[in-house]
Structure formats: C-alpha cells, structure tokens
Image (cartoon, rainbow, N blue to C red):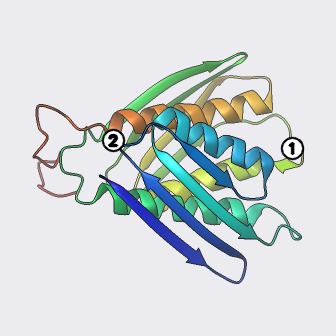
Amino acid sequence: MRSATVTRNTAETKITVEVNLDGTGQYDNQTGVGFFDHMLDQLARHSLIDMTVRCEGDLHIDDHHSVEDVGIALGQALTQAMGDKRGIVRYGSCLLPMDDALVRAALDLSARPFLMWNVDLPTAKIGTFDTELVREFFQAFSTHGGITLHVDMLHGLNSHHIAEAAFKAVARALRDALEVDPRKADAIPSTKGAL
C-alpha cells in the first residue's frame, strides 16, 4: 500500500498526519479549527485518500500556523506515500460546481511545485476562519507535495461554497492523478525516467 506517516513538531504546532493513497476516503481530522477540519474531510472523501490529521497549534494567536503547517505535513506525507511515482497517471483535473461556485483545478504530480491561485473569496471570514488561509494551505501543500497546481474560480458568490469547491476540485484532480495507469503500471510517467 502507498501510505505514510509524518510527524512535524515546532514551537508553534505539533502535527501528525497519516495517509493511505489506496484508501476509500476515510478520515479523522482534528486540528482545533472547525472549518479547516471540514475542508480536510472533503479533501480525503473526494480524493479517496484515507487521512488522519492531529494538530495542536497556537490557536490563541490565530489559525495561521496550524493551517499552513498541516499543509506542509500533508504535502510531505503525499510525497513519501507516492515513492518513485511508478505507475501513476500523474495528471488530474476537475471542474467542480457547488451551488453558485464553479472551481477548476488542474495538477501535475511533477516534483516541480508551483501554485497558480485565481480564487477571489468575497469575505474575510467564514465563521471565525480567515479566508486567506485557504490559499496558504494550498501553497504549503503544493510546495511540500511537489505539485504544480492551478486553481481557478470561474463563478462564485458565497465564500464557504467557493472554498469548499476548491478543496473538492483539488481532491478529485488528486484522485485521478494518483490512480495507477493499467497500461503503464510499471513505468514512471516521464520521458526523463524520474519524477
């Protein structure tokens, strides 16, 4: 099985992330940040990655360190679980509607991290959650997961819907990219011979 556990302890956060890329989308995410837990649950459910996240962070300051550091640890866990990436499809994309929101995600598990973020969240908060942290999560996740990631909001009025559509779109794109290609299950999907 393609799985990994990452522990990351700093002065700001203590995090453990477990992933199984060949799962069924089971999740148990507890970060102390309610909306973020809900988004991580969506990421697991729609990517079919089994995911357990535990984070104790300096929430008395704000949610920033917890959200960013979970993105770092989750990206590292993804990288470890993929190994040499033999057999993966590598690319994935999704056009995901959620009520008023329509978000497109396209990604390449290339080991060349890059984030293009064209998402306008119209409010500063979703409940008590700072909406700017959605981008911070994906920046950390793409950087430490070695993912070229493009996320574009095509339509949207409600910040909750837009953010959730972004997480679900990335999840569905990940699901496709992580699938084993039955025609090339023994090959690394690059002319270079390595990713």
Image quarter hosting the C terminus? bottom left
Q: Is mark 2 on a helix, strand or loop?
A: helix
Label 1 close to label 2 by CB (< 8 Å)? no
Q: Which residue lies most toward the top here?
A: 99
Instruction: Tell whether 3 sits left or right of 143.
Output: left
Gap in Å between the C-alphas at discs 1 and 2?
32 Å
Q: What residue type is labelled 1?
A: Lys
| Residue 38 location (% of width, % of height) | 71, 41
Instruction: Tell whether 135 sits left or right of 59.
Output: left
Q: Which residue lies most toward the bottom here?
A: 11
Q: Please report whichever mark, 1 or 2, sits nearer to the chain's N-terminal start.
A: 1
Which label lies toward us, 1 or 2?
2
Q: What element carries label 1?
A: strand
Badge 2: how crowded within 10 Å, few (<14), some, or many (20+)?
many
Is 140 in front, or is 1?
1
| Residue 159 location (% of width, % of height) | 79, 32
Badge 1: how crowded within 10 Å, few (<14), some, or many (20+)?
some
Instruction: Name the quadrant containing residue 136.
Output: bottom right
| Residue 109 location (% of width, % of height) | 34, 48
**Residue linked to disc 1:** 125
Total numbered labels placed on residues in the image:
2
**Residue linked to disc 2:** 178
Q: Which amino acid does label 2 sit on?
A: Leu
Is residue 149 placed above or below 142 in the rendered structure? above
Instruction: Name the quadrant containing residue 127.
Output: top right
Residue at 62% from the left image edge and 69% from the top image edge:
15
Residue at 29% from the left image edge and 52% from the top image edge:
1
Is residue 22 placed above or below 70 in the rendered structure? above
Instruction: Tell whether 54 sits left or right of 26.
Output: right
Is residue 55 placed above or below 38 in the rendered structure? below
